[in-house]
Image (cartoon, coloured by chain):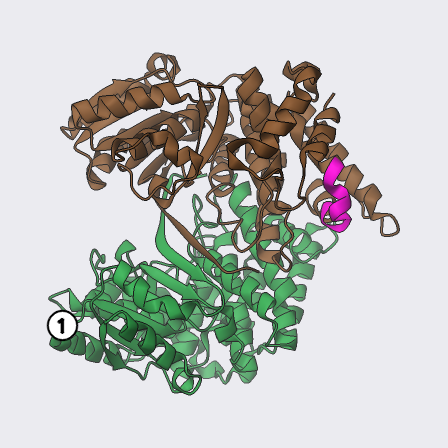
Chain colours: A brown, B green
């Protein structure tokens, strides 16, 4: 196990109706004038936005609103948010939505207190300060409610980049599973896939002797395999939604990823897909992961076999562990299909003519040195092969 | 799943040689004059205390020392520590040791800033403030390095009581697995048992539909079953010690115990044993848990069978699940024996003549209403029966 630090100081408030505590939580964490940042009309129609405003009003906390966050959140709205916060002297950013809204809020919160262009932070500059952030989560997926990360799409070229910094950890996050019950079928499937992807990215490692984090990751995957089909069958299954919501946070606050190298090539490969075709991130990951696994399993057959046995319940083929590894990948494919996810370029709306371009950007974009992935180091030719496995 | 809050704002610094960062960490969390609190001479002999002092000196941080913490830490030393801190105008308490040292430090940190008798906090008064606390952990066991709890033994009658409060969460905790390699065999076994006990206390619940926390607990138990025998066989196995150390923290910071009722009767039952016989807490738990399980399994046979299958690898007897439940308890007994733990009153040095007295104190002490346990509600007669199963 490698040396590491772990710091997750977010105050999590979990359960039914907890959004009614928003006002007192903003006050606890020092907010006096709030930007409420959100996406489309669903939080208006559902009455959630009104409940949040009521809660702020009860505590006498002033606020302004900025809606319009899109999936794969855009740099343009971040600039708009930063300007608005400065004009209105905002001291707290409150995200009401899913990962896109939270990431947009994080970028705004960091940008407001930075004199330069916020995009610097998405080109490698470390984030050391930001306005305090609170979140009210409406989609179990990205894990941004407990993470130190944010991903933004630059509209000038439509490419996605990530940033990271302890200052981006939310001060508080309200997780009410009931808020996820009204989501469309497809979006729930994408969320399940995204959570599992965060676990796979951490599972595949070259670091030896990390049994505790192996087991923690496996436990969260087993939870997703048990609860995923239950919420797909019945969105109103509060307890299944609740289990997924906590698993989604734990999958990405890094408590199960410490002390080990992680991979993350699949996210780089997917980011090119969603940047060009604007497909849902989870749907893109559903197509990428089986292909990435098929291509890279040769790097550590026994790790893939371990996943297959412990998580998918496959029988171990002790003589030919590669058969077990393949059975695990087949089980993943079957699972993703069962929750309504696409399985290839055609279902995703992607086009094979872009493969070379995407592979190049994945490997060389954003100052990368031509290689991606911590578990299996992949060059441009490897990534081309992986995209081809998605045809 | 029940509504809950979860807040674990401790900054964890994990790995080899990390105690050399003590000075900068104390500074980061606002300390300028430190009480170094510790137990016996082992941290002096090993050179750890010198390294910690060097690190503080390098940052120009002043300190005073208070050693002498015993296992089952005593109220007397807490009073002494409070007085010393006030006299020396201490603003940060640094624990160097295991759970006893950390708990004693927590009690001192809370007592210094409280006008009344610190024991009030161990009789139910909520702790709302304390000096900031840092820990350098030398024993994987109690989980106090990441928890909001402390347990102190009152010398006036030798009874143990616990207290809890967010203010008791350490600001930082340094976890260097190499520090645990020099521990005696027996103490390592006790630590393994204590960690597993924290998981069992959370596992046995009446709350329905908590798959994610069931699975997380199981993953940590599986880790202990894998790594425990490896450290017993070879104390110098750094990676096995590392896996246990992170599991020990995760077992008790409550990330795997949220949203569910917990039991904790076994801790109450054990506290009477270690208060009277001054036995090691882990050794006491090794005797208590199999007895408690045998007595209470009738309350939810299927939960015991689930544990037996998922954690101990027992075959499910679908026709007679109680056979599977029993096989799991037998596997636990065998495991505890293999790591050198006692299995009955005689090996623990306990005496059956005290059973009635202990059962009464467990159920009625500290203002309790005659019943203990969240999973199985136990009265005095039940607790007597459980003690008798330990003969």
Seen at 67% across and 15% down, the residue is: A351
In the image, taking residue B198 as reference, residue A363 lies left or right, namely right
Seen at 23% across and 35% down, the residue is: A26
Q: Report the magenta residues as a range.
A: A295-304
In the depicted view, which residue is nearer to us: A378 or B185? Answer: A378
Q: Position of residue A246 (x, y in %)?
A: 47, 39
In the depicted view, which residue is nearer to us: B106 or B240? Answer: B240
Question: Is A280 contained in the magenta span?
Answer: no
Tell me the SS state at disc 1: loop
User: Label 1 marks which chain's residue?
Assistant: B
In the image, taking residue B233 as reference, residue B91 lies left or right, namely left
Quadrant in the rendering for residue A263:
top right
The reply to whether residue B151 is in sight is no
**What is the number of callouts on the image?**
1
Q: Position of residue B304 (x, y in %)?
A: 61, 53
For label 1, count other residues whose C-alpha is less than 10 Å away and answer few (under 14), some (14-19) or many (20+): some
In the image, taking residue B248 as reference, residue A211 lies left or right, namely right
Seen at 49% across and 19% down, the residue is: A157
User: B55 above or below A62?
Assistant: below
Q: Position of residue A114 (x, y in %)?
A: 27, 35
In the depicted view, which residue is nearer to us: B310 or A165? Answer: A165
User: B353 above or below A4?
Assistant: below
Dominant secondary structure (helix, strand or loop) of the stretch shown in magenta = helix
The reply to whether residue A319 is in sight is yes
Quadrant in the rendering for residue B224:
bottom right
Q: Position of residue A318 (x, y in %)?
A: 85, 52
User: A17 above or below A298?
Assistant: above
Query: Which residue position holds label 1?
Result: B89
On-image quarter of the C terminus of chain B: bottom right
Question: Is A299 contained in the magenta span?
Answer: yes
């Amino acid at each position: 196990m490698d040396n590491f630090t772990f710091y997750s100081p977010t105050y999590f408030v979990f359960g039914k109706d907890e959004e009614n505590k928003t006002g007192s939580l903003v006050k606890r964490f020092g907010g006096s004038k709030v930007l409420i940042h959100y996406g489309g009309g669903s939080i208006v129609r559902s009455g959630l936005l009104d409940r949040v405003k009521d809660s702020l009003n009860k505590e006498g906390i002033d606020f302004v609103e900025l809606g319009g966050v899109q999936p794969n959140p855009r740099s343009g709205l971040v600039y708009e948010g930063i300007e608005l916060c400065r004009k209105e002297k905002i001291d707290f950013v409150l995200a009401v939505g899913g990962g896109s809204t939270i990431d947009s809020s994080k970028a705004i919160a960091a940008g407001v207190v930075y004199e330069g262009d916020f995009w610097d932070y998405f080109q490698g500059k470390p984030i050391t300060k930001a306005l305090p952030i609170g979140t009210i989560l409406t989609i179990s997926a990205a894990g941004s409610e407990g993470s130190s990360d944010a991903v933004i799409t630059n509209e000038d070229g439509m490419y996605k980049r990530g940033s990271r910094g302890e200052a981006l950890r939310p001060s508080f996050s309200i997780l009410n599973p009931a808020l996820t019950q009204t989501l469309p079928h497809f979006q729930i499937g994408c969320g399940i896939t995204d959570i599992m992807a965060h676990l796979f990215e951490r599972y595949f490692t070259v670091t030896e002797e990390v049994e505790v984090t192996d087991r923690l990751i496996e436990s969260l995957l087993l939870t997703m395999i048990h609860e995923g089909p239950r919420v797909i069958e019945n969105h109103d299954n509060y307890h299944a939604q609740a289990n997924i919501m906590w698993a989604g946070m734990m999958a990405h606050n890094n408590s199960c990823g410490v002390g080990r190298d992680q991979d993350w090539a699949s996210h780089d490969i997917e980011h090119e897909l969603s940047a060009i075709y604007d497909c849902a991130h989870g749907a893109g990951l559903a197509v990428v992961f089986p292909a990435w696994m098929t291509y890279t399993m040769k790097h550590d057959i026994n790790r893939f076999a371990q996943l297959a046995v412990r998580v998918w319940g496959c029988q171990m083929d002790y003589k030919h562990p590669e058969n077990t590894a393949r059975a695990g990948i087949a089980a993943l494919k079957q699972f993703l299909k069962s929750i309504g996810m696409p399985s290839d370029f055609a279902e995703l709306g992607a086009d094979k003519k872009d493969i070379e371009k995407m592979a190049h950007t994945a490997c060389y974009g954003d100052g990368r040195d031509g290689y991606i992935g911590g578990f299996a180091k992949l060059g441009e030719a490897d990534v081309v092969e992986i995209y081809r496995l998605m045809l």
